[in-house]
Image: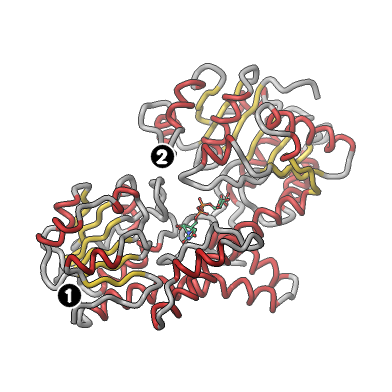
Amino acid sequence: MRSPKKIVCLGAGYVGGPTMVVMASHNPNIEFYVTDQNVARIEAWNSDALPVFEPGLDAIVKKVRDKNLFFRTIEPSLLEAADIVFVCVGTPTKEYGEGKGMAADLQFTELAVRDIEKYCKSGTIIVEKSTVPVRTAEAILNIVNTQQKGKNFDVLSNPEFLAEGTAIQDLQNPDRVLIGHAETESAKKSAEVIKALYTAWINPEKVLLTNVWSSELSKLVANAFLAQRVSSINSISALCEKTNASVSQISLALGKDARIGPRFLEASVGFGGSCFKKDILNLVYIARQHGLLEVADYWQSVIDMNDYQTRRFVSQVIETQFNSVSGKKIAILGFAFKGDTNDTRESPAIYVCKRLIEEKARLFIHDVKALENAKKDLSGIDKTVTYTTDIEEATDGAHALVILTPWREYEELDYAQIFSRMAKPAFVFDGRRIVDAQKLFGMGYNVKQIGIQPLMHF
Ligand code: UGA
């Protein structure tokens, strides 16, 4: 293909939006159309209040929007003119039928692909970017190439490795870019076209061309390995709490081993987000389908350990407060699944808050960016919940502070002053290991922090 002139992205979510914004900023001679069926989401992308919060995103959007990047509700004429279509629609875990609770729900992918097949011209390159189970590109290829005679498409896999909160950094300077393609001459050429989009700003050595299935599976496995590290260190945090070992000292010692490395060794209340659990469940499902039960059980245990860690944490919150939190004011500090994002999907905070609501606690939920999503997650069960962006309102008169998201703001709070206004005995439950436990203990708090023995005044 000659150099592409128009690129359409289907899906204006956490993946499609930031990816196209960065790609457009480095490919000023190509027009990018980020599309969605959701009119409100497109309006938000065209406003000052973007639907996705990512540090650094605003500035680049301002630079490229309505120059060579356009946010539009999807319409056939955009697809008709496209040289390349990126498929960035959601692939949530299936909530019905075969594979319920485990397999990826590909209904949005399939709808997108049917539109492509219907409206795109022959030769348009289709790039699958949503995380999908292996062999989806093949399924897409079957749909598009069997429908209308006379049209031919190459379908490539180009999985996204950006993490929320650091999306722009990850896109500007990725560890690698994977492009999976079939072994045909045409698919190889298409892969080179996609590669050129990336080498506009990325060192070509970082762009790896693989077969389609390796590319698809690499994405699932990368997330599974990262999640496995968190579950492994979380399992050790439970042991540390019973002994005199400290999980941060262990993480440090492990991280210094060059073979292991320092990242993803922070013990926590559990990993959340839309990716880890979903991708591991997919992996488990695929392994089971192939009759590999031991493989399935092995990866399932990574999720089981994560659920255990969150359950264990909330039990501690209840047990430590004399087995009853009924009627007590509890300040929840953080609801997002990690810092620097407004995303709350699969956040451990959802489970923790639901359990505390069941125990009849009065929750005051504080978050820097995620309160709107928190309200949706708890809607219908939040009669005893107050949502606030005011730390004093959240903590005044509270019996306990429960830290669930590692927002930098929570590291910098005036804990002595907060203590003076709390009900006594005052407790801190630090599910993210961001406070100086000894220092807070010295101020009078009873401190339960993941991965160290409890510091109690009684
Ligand atoms: C993850 C991967 O890191 C990305 O590479 C991938 O592209 C993305 O999924 C995806 O599939 O789209 P993300 O879910 O945004 O990214 O967030 P992570 O930074 O990986 O964090 C996941 C969870 O693990 C968070 O709840 C985080 O707080 C927790 N975590 C992470 C820990 O508890 N401890 C750690 O040491 C690291």
Whether residue 309 is visible, yes or no, is: yes
Q: Which residue is mark 2?
A: 53
Q: Assign the N terminus to one quadrant of the image.
A: top right
SS for callout 2: loop
Mark sitting on residue 307: none
- Is 102 or 259 nearer to us in this picture? 259
**Left/right of residue 130 with respect to residue 427 in the rendered view:** right
Number of numbered labels in the structure image:
2
Q: Is residue 142 shown above or below 7? A: below
**Left/right of residue 456 with respect to residue 334 in the rendered view:** left
Residue 46 location, x and y as percent? Answer: 42, 26
Q: Is residue 126 shown above or below 66? A: below
Q: Is residue 367 shown above or below 94? A: above
Residue appearing at x 54%, y 57% in the figure: 263
Task: Using the rendered view, name the quadrant where residue 5 is placed.
Answer: top right
**Left/right of residue 439 with respect to residue 74 in the rendered view:** left
Question: How far apart are the alpha carbons under marks 1 and 2?
Answer: 35 Å
Amino acid residing under circle 1? Ser
The local crowd at label 2, few if under 14, some if 14 to 19, many if 20 or more residues have their Cα within 10 Å, is many
Mark sitting on residue 326: 1
Residue 448 location, x and y as percent? Answer: 30, 72
Amino acid residing under circle 2? Phe
The local crowd at label 1, few if under 14, some if 14 to 19, many if 20 or more residues have their Cα within 10 Å, is some
